[in-house]
Amino acid sequence: MSDAIKISPSILSADFGELSRAVALVEEAGADSIHVDVMDGHFVPNLTIGPPVIKALKQSCTIPLHAHLMVDNPDESLDWYIDAGVDGVTVHVEATGHLNRALSHARESGVKAGVSLNPSTPIASLRDALPDADHVLLMSVNPGFGGQSFLPSALRRLGELVLLAREMGASPAIEIDGGITAANAGDVVREGARVLIAGNAVFGAEDPVAAVRELRVAAEAGLTPED
């Protein structure tokens, strides 16, 4: 197993009535973190999980819990999720006018700070924020719903992100989210992704434990000897 690859199952596709069991299954499979898609019904057309559920999950979760805030004005609600016990937060560049401040606040609060981009948002919009980001989450679908198909343009965008990070002298963990399966895991890793977020491919499978392990094997096949 390579430490270069991280697998982060998204509980958006899990049975919300059995979240603790879903988390336990992927922990058993060796998942590296749990991804929580927080949607407010405004920034994206769906409404999902809030701080009380995250706080409850944190009580039984033994691996890092990361909140992906697909919400308007994340600056106003960032502390809700930090106080609920997340280990990392991700805000959208499209949703905040104070990106550097949000990232710095998260870091100062002791959690990992990340920024996410929608598929049509230029990679260059991250230029001045990269030094403040622990991770960058590239969306490979338009956010809002699970089970969507991977957008092939994400492969080109991954390459652009890698080049920009190199140019800026930054080294954020590069995450990808949306339509990730064992069939495309190797491709996204070859283009620079190192954290693979998968919901339907894991929790839509008959055996989530086997699905996590299959995804990791497929992702590691995309690594080069230098990795």
Image (tube, helix red, strand yellow):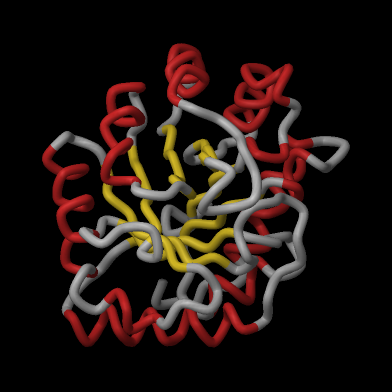
The image quadrant where one finds the C terminus is: bottom left
Instruction: Compare residues 200 and 68 and report the one nearer the observer.
Output: 68
Report the side of 212 relative to 64 (left or right): right
x and y percentages locating residue 197 in the rendered image: 57, 52
Report the side of 169 relative to 160 (left or right): left
In this view, which residue lies farthest toward the left? 108
Instruction: Compare residues 59 and 69 and report the one nearer the observer.
Output: 69
Report the side of 6 relative to 15 (left or right): left
Report the side of 173 relative to 176 (left or right): left
In this rendering, the count of numbered labels is 0
x and y percentages locating residue 56 in the rendered image: 49, 14
x and y percentages locating residue 192 in the rendered image: 46, 75
Residue at horizontal 48 percent and vertical 40 percent from the top: 32
In this view, which residue lies farthest toward the front? 42
Quarter of the rendering containing residue 211? top right
Residue at horizontal 18 percent and vertical 60 percent from the top: 100
Residue at horizontal 35 percent and vertical 22 percent from the top: 84
x and y percentages locating residue 152 in the rendered image: 67, 81
Quarter of the rendering containing residue 87? top left
In this view, which residue lies farthest toward the right? 206
Quarter of the rendering containing residue 140? bottom right
Instruction: Compare residues 142 and 189 and report the one nearer the observer.
Output: 142
Residue at horizontal 61 percent and vertical 26 percent from the top: 23
